[in-house]
Amino acid sequence: MPAEITRAMTRTRPDRAEAIRLREFALHCLTRHGALGALEGENVRASLSEMHISRPGSELIAEGARLDKPCLLLDGWGVRQRVLNDGRRQIFSFVLPGDVIGLSARREGTAVCTTVALTEAALAPLPLLAEAVHEEQSMLGHVARDLLSQEESFLYNQVLRLGRQSAHERMISLLLEFHARLQRVGFVRDGSFALPLTQEILSDALGLSVVHTNRTLQQLKREHLIASKGSIISLGNLEQLAEMADWRL
Amino acid sequence: MPAEITRAMTRTRPDRAEAIRLREFALHCLTRHGALGALEGENVRASLSEMHISRPGSELIAEGARLDKPCLLLDGWGVRQRVLNDGRRQIFSFVLPGDVIGLSARREGTAVCTTVALTEAALAPLPLLAEAVHEEQSMLGHVARDLLSQEESFLYNQVLRLGRQSAHERMISLLLEFHARLQRVGFVRDGSFALPLTQEILSDALGLSVVHTNRTLQQLKREHLIASKGSIISLGNLEQLAEMADWRL
DNA sequence: CGAGTGTTTGATAATGTTCAAGAAGCGTGG
DNA sequence: CCACGCTTCTTGAACATTATCAAACACTCG
């Protein structure tokens, strides 16, 4: 049996113990602003049992696709990106656990870029989110609008980084964003978090060459602004960093 | 009487002839996808008589403000921007005639950046748009969603420019965007259009220094890719330009 | 005319890219 | 457990692009 097929068949669903943990996490994210309505809760619980796992590198949403199947990312990282004719790639934003993909505030919304899984990604379809966005009173709607709002805000920060900040500032700003977002969903321990990104991916997000990304990271380490071992990274003085990169959430 | 006050008092409303022209233009934009419903039409016509003129440099929407008073820009140019602590400015997007400001697909949406008039700007409040966004069948809603959709698409293009394109590509891409957008609302004559922007503003949009913007423009002229006299600009071979900048709408 | 704003030019410096090659890390199969 | 191949990371040197600074010029408006 060819290796490809073997790999394709491994882990399209999480094992039992993990599924429970992920379901817990999902409910934690969705009830951040308060308890769900009874009907909502029922529907969400049913949806959560539909969770599945995507392999790293797999395309989750194609550019131009209808945004009508919202999914909540329960674990793993993804990116929204576009590739130019000559192969240059730009990453627009990152998708982190607790974020949604495939959701649009517009009813006939289509994807303006491709969404790709960077790591193994556990996703739960949440079709109810699509309607909830437009329901003023729905708690799920509140969460959905909050997530969309965040997403917009991150995109604006991304423009700011790329347009007017130096390599150092860009890197700090992005790391601060990761920190804040992961902190919010409980993925930060003792000021450290896992950063499952190659330097090439960071480069494509920050609009830098890989080499320069590497040097920027090294200098930040030399200056003790960040520290890392393996893929675990920790940020130094957060206020100082925020000041340096003119960062706000 | 101090000069400031004199200027503040000039032209807060368009004169009669201009008002008629602007009203015509507004209806043209709003019926692009088809005739409005009777009620909608009535409401819109009433709103249009509320049009007023903002002075260049005036802040139309402050960062953080509630997006609950949609306005249609009937004439003039605006930008969405943010200014860093040290004075660096980034322009996120341009507001052109036929665009809306103050509209959000989310009900409690707030502005993530400031909107400023670059030139004299004729604006008509269109409160009905805010509700229409959520109404599936409303023709006005269709227009509103279309405009929001455009806006998102332009922002993604902006990230692409800033992140992965050279100064030349950025400039071409932005000029092509202007061309396409202005063409759509009938502001292009014989392939030429008015570009009421200083090079400093272009720079703050493209993430370049003013000097470099100047040199980039000059080189494009030398290569006969663009031509300009006064603030009127015309683009050369559009296919070629689109190819060069990997441009898509 | 004189002030203010915007454009143009040249010289120089900083920032970031490219190319090339070696080192380190990691999963796979023997 | 090691050897292999692959990807990722690291480093140096040459190069390109873009920024910065300073000054001159052009244009408009009161």
Image: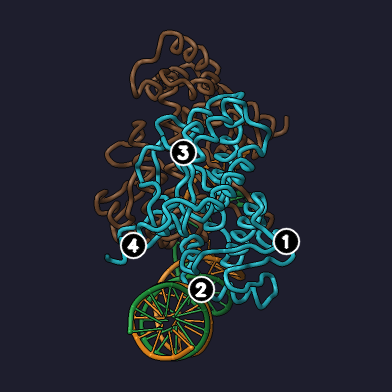
Chain colours: A cyan, B brown, C green, D orange
> Is disc 1 in the same subunit as disc 3?
yes
B157 vs A35, left or right, is left
Which of the marked residues, 1 or 4, is nearer the chain's N terminus?
A: 4
Q: Amino acid at mark 4?
A: Thr
Q: Residues within 10 Å of mark 3 (few under 14, many from 20)?
A: many
Q: Which residue is mark 2?
A: A212
Q: Nearer the viewer, mark 1 or mark 4?
A: 4
Q: Residues within 10 Å of mark 2 (few under 14, many from 20)?
A: some
Classify B1 as above or below D9. above
Chain letter of disc 4 in the image: A
Q: Nearer the viewer, residue B177 or A135?
A: A135
Classify A92 as above or below A144. below
Q: Which residue is mark 4?
A: A6
Q: Which residue is mark 1?
A: A238
Which of the marked residues, 2 or 1, is nearer the chain's N terminus?
A: 2
The disc label shown at residue A70, or none:
3
A203 vs B247, left or right, is right
Give the SS element for disc 4: helix
Classify A60 as above or below B181. below
Asked if disc 4 and disc 3 are in contact, CB closer than 8 Å, the reply is: no
* Visible residue check, residue B58: no
